[in-house]
Amino acid sequence: MSAATTRSRIPDRLCAEAVGLARAAAEEAAAPGVVGDHVSVVAEGDRVVTHFFECEELGYRGWRWAVTVTRASRAKNVTLDETVLLPGPGSLLAPEWVPWSERLRPGDMGPGDLLPTEAEDLRLEPGYTGEDTPPPNSAVPELVPDTVPALTPQNLADLVEAEDAEPTDLSADTPAVPARGSIASVAEELGMRRARVLSRYGLHMAADRWDEAFGAKTPMAQAAPAPCVSCGFLLPLAGSLRQAFGVCANEFSPADGRVVSLAYGCGGHSEAAVMPAPPRPAPHVLDSMATDAFPLRPSPDSGSVPVTPDGEPEDLGHS
């Protein structure tokens, strides 16, 4: 360990004795009566010392006022460097900041809220591919430079930002229909004019989320008389999700208007009233739970003859 490092860990004597200067600086930054007792002195470097005082503010429990003082080389006058309020070992701190995209939960959006999606969102993929510029030697003429571009998420974001900055006339920048000959116009004719559609990853995420909420493993489905696949209130979905999900249309069901798994079920099944009662199991042939009576003497109606202790037939004619 070098000599300079050793000296830096030992507080300077004059700076360490300047407790009154440090307290006055802390009270000037805070308020009289808010600065508590002197806690410790820490050497920050050569002739640089920080004094710590307790903070008596009710909202800053465990915090400390840190006042750093210093002096020049070969000078006896101690000067103030800075005064800050720092958290202590057991201080009350605010929770760690989390971006809004990670704090957002289902159901948090309200009327008028806008939820932008990232350009590289894994849940989405391009709705159609290809450039708007026709390939070489194409029968479709190239678009003229002054043609108004088609609407895209980026263009819409630029328009919203410009609208917030100053009033603009959007009629000149937003076309009613895309330019003829562009990929957007062809996609619109085919009913596929969506910049992005759900990707396989987004599809699987949605399916897992729906199955967790209204799937076969829920308590309601475990006690249901039959699954939703045989219910008349089920509206099947389109596409690949039709094989596993549908929408419940029973107003008395807890899943009314929700996407449910075909294996889900509830007591509002359309055929619950006409379903046969579950068969009751037959009683056991050998009842091992009850006791069997064994009489010591046979009854008179049984027709058997009682015997004496010696094994001889008992004479029923004599008393």
Image (tube, rainbow, N blue to C red):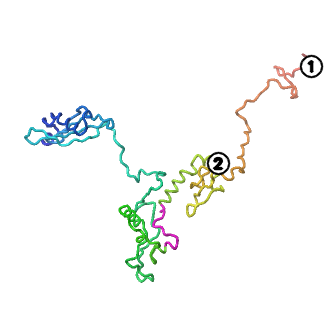
Q: Residue furthest top?
A: 319
Instruction: Name the quadrant containing residue 310.
Output: top right
The label shown at residue 267 is 2
> Secondary structure under badge 1?
loop
Q: Does residue 77 appear left or right of residue 274 in this picture?
A: left
Task: Please tell me which of labels 2 and 1 falls first in the chain.
Answer: 2
Q: Is residue 1 visible?
A: no
Residue found 67% across the figure and 53% down from its top: 270
Q: Residue furthest right?
A: 317
Instruction: Name the quadrant containing residue 61.
Output: top left
| Amino acid on which the number 2 mark rests in the picture | Gly
Q: Name the residue that disc number 1 marks.
A: 317
Q: State the residue in front, 299 or 121.
A: 121
Q: Is residue 279 visible?
A: yes
Up the image or down, 203 lies above or below 70; here it is below
Mark 2 is surrounded, within 10 Å at the Cα level, by few (under 14), some (14 to 19) or many (20 or more) other residues, namely: some
Q: Provide residue 27's location: percent of width, then percent of height.
A: 23, 36
Region of the chain picked out in magenta, as a range: 187-200
Q: Residue furthest left?
A: 74
Q: Provide residue 282's location: percent of width, then percent of height.
A: 73, 42
Instruction: Name the quadrant containing residue 123.
Output: bottom left
Q: Does residue 246 appear left or right of residue 113 in this picture?
A: right
Q: Provide residue 131's location: percent of width, then percent of height.
A: 42, 74
Work out how far the residue at label 2 is from the one at label 1, CA to CA, in angstroms: 72 Å
The quarter of the image holding the N terminus is top left
Closer to viewer: mark 2 or mark 1? 2
Q: State the residue in front, 271 or 81.
A: 81
> Does 188 lie within the magenta span?
yes
